[in-house]
Amino acid sequence: MTLKEVKFHADAYWWQRDEMGELLAHFTSIIANPHYKSDIKPNKIYKRRDTKEISKEEKQAEFDKAVKLMGAKSIPVTRQVK
């Protein structure tokens, strides 16, 4: 087995683990929410390995860059970042 194949199998393993973790976190939050005053979100229970945390400032910078490239008149644009 080549190194490329080993990396492919390792990536597939971690992807499968992340998918199962998200699924279990979703069902866990559904079961746990009636017992708590505030809602527990699945992403608070399990975080994927392949996602990066992006700050609001970075999101706003990407949004402004996209608006600058497209032009503000091409698509009606609002400046709300969630």
Image (cartoon, grey):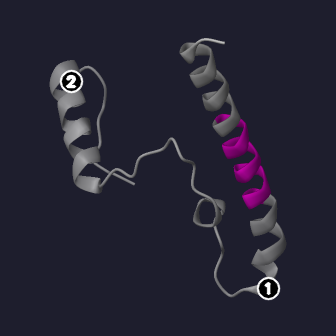
Q: Is residue 70 above or below residue 42?
A: above
Residue type pointed to by label 1? His
Question: Percent from the top left, x then y, of residue 67?
Answer: 21, 29
Q: Which mark is residue 78?
A: none
* Viewer-side label of 2, 1: 1
Residue type pointed to by label 2? Lys
Indicate the quadrant where residue 14 lies: top right
Q: Which residue is pictured at 76% across the width and 76% down the height? A: 33
Q: Quadrant of the C terminus?
A: bottom left
At label 1, counting other C-alpha atoms closer than 10 Å, the crowd grade (few under 14, some 14-19, many 20 or more) is few
**Extent of the magenta region:** 15-26
Along the viewing direction, whichever of 4 and 51 lies nearer the viewer: 4
Q: Which residue is pictured at 29% across the width and 45% down the height? A: 59
Question: Percent from the top left, x then y, of residue 81?
Answer: 33, 51
In this figure, which residue is indicated by the disc labeled 2?
73
Badge 2 marks a residue whose secondary structure is loop
Q: Quadrant of the N terminus?
A: top right
Q: Which circle's residue, 2 or 1, is located before the other in the chain?
A: 1
In this figure, which residue is indicated by the disc labeled 1?
35
Q: Is residue 63 above or below residue 3?
A: below
Residue at the extreme front: 1
Residue at the extreme top: 2
Q: Is residue 18 magenta?
A: yes
Badge 1 marks a residue whose secondary structure is helix
In the drawing, does residue 59 fall left or right of residue 14? left
Q: Which residue is pictured at 79% across the width and 66% down the height? A: 28
Q: Which residue is pictured at 29% across the width and 43% down the height? A: 78
Q: Is residue 37 above or below residue 76?
A: below
